[in-house]
Image (cartoon, helix red, strand yellow):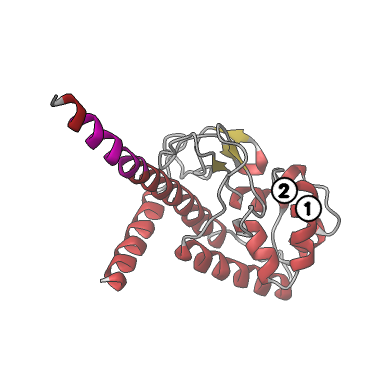
């Protein structure tokens, strides 16, 4: 007779356990993308841009500032239609923009972002052919390879994303297995974010938790 109460208890607690597991997966996915963006931002800020014009340099600096704010907000697209794979989402089903799409929209080119989402929503940046994207990148002081570095993929709901695990777009849009940590420091192991990127992320998380108390 004791079996029945135990079974009932298991049935009642199963949804709670499932919800907690889902929350944990989503948090790990958020941390993975946040680490990727922190690393790429640091890398792009360190690059020599003396070859760019003054307007391009200003636009690039503004976009990198926006990328930092976007990362700190921690609201990223969700892969809702491809449960068992990593895939780019330029703009997801809820209207959430990826990092590249956010930069395009924030610069005042929302129509361009919508055009990309309508025709190439799951494409990697180097494969995109939407008219105007290359011109936007040039005016904004970025190369297509740099936009590809920024672009992450998003894990489907059947995946359990580790902080650096799963296929993503690497430098120049090449596919790799680092889950969004494509730009590594010299001597770092493949797929490992730099120590500076991790420290930046740790400080950001600590500040966020302090504000929430």
Mark 1 element type: helix
Q: Residue at 86% of width from left, 55% of height from top?
A: 131
Q: Are marks 1 and 2 in contact (CB under 8 Å)?
A: yes
In-front residue for pair 130/147: 130
Magenta region: 6-18
Residue 101 screen position, x and y as percent: 67, 59
Q: Residue at 51% of width from left, 55% of height from top?
A: 37
At label 2, counting other C-alpha atoms closer than 10 Å, the crowd grade (few under 14, some 14-19, many 20 or more) is: some
Mark 2 element type: loop
User: Image quarter for residue 135?
Assistant: bottom right
Residue receiving disc 1: 118
Q: Residue furthest right?
A: 131
Left or right: residue 166 versus residue 192 is: right
Q: Main SS type for the magenta part?
A: helix
Q: Residue furthest front?
A: 1
Left or right: residue 204 versus residue 191 is: left
């Amino acid at each position: 007779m004791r079996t029945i109460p135990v079974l009932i208890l298991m049935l009642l607690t199963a949804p709670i356990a499932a919800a907690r597991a889902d929350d944990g997966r989503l948090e790990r996915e958020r941390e993975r993308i946040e680490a990727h963006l922190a690393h790429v931002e640091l890398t792009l800020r360190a690059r020599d841009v003396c070859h760019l014009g003054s307007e391009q340099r200003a636009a690039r600096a503004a976009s990198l500032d926006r990328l930092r704010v976007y990362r700190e907000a921690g609201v990223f697209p969700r892969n809702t239609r491809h449960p068992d794979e990593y895939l780019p989402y330029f703009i997801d089903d809820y209207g959430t923009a990826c990092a590249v799409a956010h930069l395009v929209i924030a610069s005042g080119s929302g129509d361009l972002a919508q055009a990309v989402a309508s025709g190439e929503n799951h494409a990697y940046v180097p494969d995109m052919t939407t008219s105007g994207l290359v011109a936007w990148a040039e005016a904004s002081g970025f190369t297509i390879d740099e936009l590809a570095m920024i672009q992450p993929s998003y894990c489907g709901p059947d995946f359990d994303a580790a902080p650096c695990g799963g296929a993503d777009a690497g430098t120049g849009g090449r596919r790799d297995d680092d889950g969004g940590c494509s730009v590594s420091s010299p001597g770092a192991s493949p797929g490992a974010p730099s120590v500076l990127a991790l420290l930046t992320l740790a400080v950001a998380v600590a500040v966020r938790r302090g504000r929430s108390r």
